[in-house]
Image: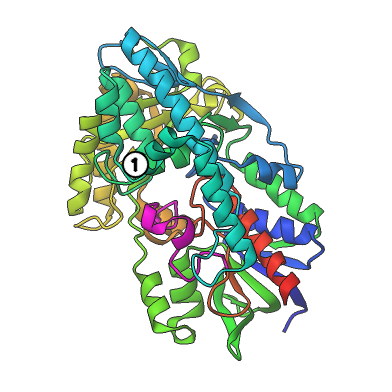
Amino acid sequence: MADRYDAIIIGAGHNGLVCGALLAKAGKKVLILEAQEQVGGAAITRKFADGFSVSACAHLLYQLQPQVCKDLDLSIDTVADDMATIALDSAGQHLRIRNGAATGLNDSDARQLHAFHKRMARFSELLRTYLNKTPPRLANGTKTDVVTLARLGLDMRRLGRKEMRAFLRLIGMNIYDEVEERFENPLLKGAISLDAVLGTHLGPRSPNTILTYLYRLAGNHGKLSTPTGGMSGVTEALAQRARDSGATLRTSMPVKRIVVDNGRATGVETDNGETFSSWIVASNADPKTTIMQLVTPRYLETGFVRRIDNIRMRGNAAKLHLALDGLPVIKGIDKKDFAERMLIAPDADYVERAFNPAKYGEMSADPVLEITVPSFRDPSLAPTGKHVLSAIVQYAPYGLREGWSDAARDTLMNHAIDKIAAYAPDIRQRIIAAEMLTPADLESEFRIGGGHWHHGELALDAFLFTRPVSGAAQYAMPLDGLYLCGAGTHPGGGISGAAGRNAARAILDREKTT
């Protein structure tokens, strides 16, 4: 048995790095184990073709919590800040949206968008406050839990009676009804709908999609940035903070199991047979993988295991990477526009129709896409004169009825490229190399159960007090010494760091009371 650590972190994704860095900064002896050769989890930059690199999964930064940066004295270099969103129109009459304003809207829609953005930003500020707190227990809570609940009530009342009622009414509703009631412009309705459902197994008409929209805004009101060098610019900076604080990072070290002795987690065993002992084990893996595979159900109460096994983890987003010999031609798009985010989501009904096949285990033949060309601002990602196109493609269900074979992957890729070609007719002639990562590929490459980047669906029944499940919402599992610190815990996924920070604080607070 190796030297005993104060804490072992399973997984060097961004939340694991945040958790490990904060524990090390507090003076703890920390070991962070990563299965891959590269730290970062799904937030990495890697080559996908000769000379071409891309942010492999997450590709835009919009949720990193300011408190995480403050606690770790972290500064992220970016090549793009406050990117515009361009909702593409097949006739070239594109809609450019930024910070609650858009070009090409009539007066009514312009006023409505301003009011809508102002209200949603205010609601998201309330949400952000509690993304950065350990959720309080609703029953048998401590004094701290009671105080947090009281503050939540007071903060909601500070919205004012009218807005508090609106918040409580809206948060469980669907985004479709809201945009249809407010706006006339179909591109605007499609863009907002896409933002509400991106990465989820939800369509615009699904309940909870206003919650998911608010969650997206709770980083920096939805302002988009691109880190220098891709997403590894974030995770490498976090890894360096962890090392500077004294944590030990080891890569190419998949964890085989969490060692349990006398009813508590006492360390881990890796695939190569090495064992490491620790007072605390914090898993950045998703809850289902942690409990069902790394711990195994025999050490836990049956009801708890059943709740964990029932977590909804149906990934529905794929990732397309194209190496291009030059920029494609899109009617109505100037060269400088390739620095921005582009969407293919013509209207809210289109987004809902794209979701329909996924309900029955089928991929969408007419998917919605979020497209960036990161090499336009960051030439380090591609050879001179050439470019990388990165796109999130929805909907592509993890549980595809016929399974994710090479043929199915190629079919999805062709659907996505055909859709891009409807706006950029020369795209196929530009392609040098292509890569399509299905949810099954995301699961395999990044060890994300179900290929779901939130480590479980984000919904009111899996949020705050009940995330990942009731009885485990405060990061500590019902097995002494075991914690979760990843996206499957409160508040959820996205490159936020809040889950890792909250878990570290919960571990340190628990230590003070034991």
From this view, report whether residue 302 is shown above or below residue 122: below
Between 166 and 359, the one nearer to me in the picture: 166
Q: Residue at x 44, y 55 (%)?
A: 463
From this view, report whether residue 474 is shown above or below residue 280: above
**Is residue 352 something one can see in this rendering?**
yes
**Residue 334, image quadrant:** top left
Q: Does the magenta run of residues contain 471?
A: yes
Where residue 224 sits: x, y (%)? 53, 29
Q: Does the magenta run of residues contain 16?
A: no
Q: Secondary structure at mark 1?
A: helix
The quarter of the image holding the N terminus is bottom right
**Is residue 347 something one can see in this rendering?**
no
The quarter of the image holding the C terminus is bottom right
Q: Residue at x 64, y 29 (%)?
A: 78
Q: Residue furthest front?
A: 161
Q: Is residue 483 left or right of residue 509?
A: left
Q: Residue at x 51, y 20 (%)?
A: 339
Where residue 451 sits: x, y (%)? 39, 55
From this view, report whether residue 104 is shown above or below residue 202: above
Q: Is residue 436 left or right of residue 80?
A: left
Where residue 230 sits: x, y (%)? 58, 36
**Residue 450, image quadrant:** bottom left
Amino acid type, residue under disc 1 in the picture: Arg
Q: Label 1: which residue?
A: 169
* Span shown in magenta: 451-475
**Category of crowding for the residue at label 1, using alpha-carbon neighbours closer than 10 angstroms: few (below 14), some (14–19), many (at least 20):** few
Where residue 356 sits: x, y (%)? 18, 44
Between 435 and 14, the one nearer to me in the picture: 14
Number of numbered discs visible in the structure rendering: 1
From this view, report whether residue 332 is shown above or below residue 78: above
Q: Main secondary structure of the magenta part?
A: loop
